[in-house]
Image (cartoon, grey):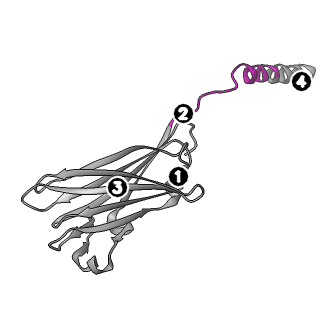
Amino acid sequence: METSKLTIACVAGVLATIGILYPNQTLAKTSRVTYYNATQICQATDPGNFTGLRFRTQGIYNSSNSSIQVACALPREFISDNNTTDIWIFAHNFRTGPATINCSVQAGSRNVGTMNVYPRSFVVQPLDSTSTAITNIDHVTANYTHYAVSCIIPPKLELGLLRVMESDAGDEL
């Protein structure tokens, strides 16, 4: 009986020593990727342009003869409070010539009242698909609480998926 008490005391002492010698163990970096279909989370910023948009299974297609702006709100439950977020925007071109799509990510904080805009333009080749990424959006210093994506979709282009990757160096995702 005395031996088991002594063993427990020794093990407890060793564990306490390890805790004192190595108090700040580095946690593994984690990441989480979520895909959103533009059909689910985007809408025309001007209701008058709604008739030019086709909400298809692959994304939002602009069937009109002029560019249409859409806004997409990213659900809050997938935005971590730590480190960085990368957002990819995927587009498809159904035209016979290249087209440029202009997008931006708006990152804001309700608590601090700040809003930062990360603009991005990218060319989609004829009858092809491509994507662009807005990377390393910092949560820690900016204290962002919400994100949105807005794009001006040229005629015969489709806004497809939005890919959100959160990274956390502290294994808190």
Badge 2 vs badge 1, beta-carbon distance below 8 Å: no
Badge 4 vs badge 1, beta-carbon distance below 8 Å: no
Label 2, residues with CA under 10 Å away: few <14, some 14-19, many ≥20: few
Residue 152 lies within the magenta run:
no
Residue 5 tag number: 4
Amino acid on which disc 1 is placed: Tyr
Q: Identify residue for label 3.
A: 104
Label 2 vs label 1: CA separation?
23 Å
Residue 141 x %, y %: 55, 42
Observer-side mark, 2 or 1, equals: 1
Of the two numbered discs 3 and 4 on the same chain, state the one appearing first in sequence: 4
Residue 28 tag number: 2
Observer-side mark, 3 or 4, equals: 3
| Local secondary structure at mark 4 | helix
Amino acid on which disc 3 is placed: Ser
Residue 88 x %, y %: 33, 50
Residue 51 tag number: none
Image: 160 above or below 167: below
Of the two numbered discs 3 and 1 on the same chain, state the one appearing first in sequence: 3
Residue at the outermost right position? 2
Label 4 vs label 1: CA separation?
52 Å
Of the two numbered discs 2 and 1 on the same chain, state the one appearing first in sequence: 2
| Local secondary structure at mark 1 | loop
Q: Identify residue for label 1.
A: 144
Asked whether, in this view, residue 171 is left or right of residue 34, the answer is right
| Local secondary structure at mark 3 | strand
Asked whether, in this view, residue 34 is left or right of residue 14, the answer is left
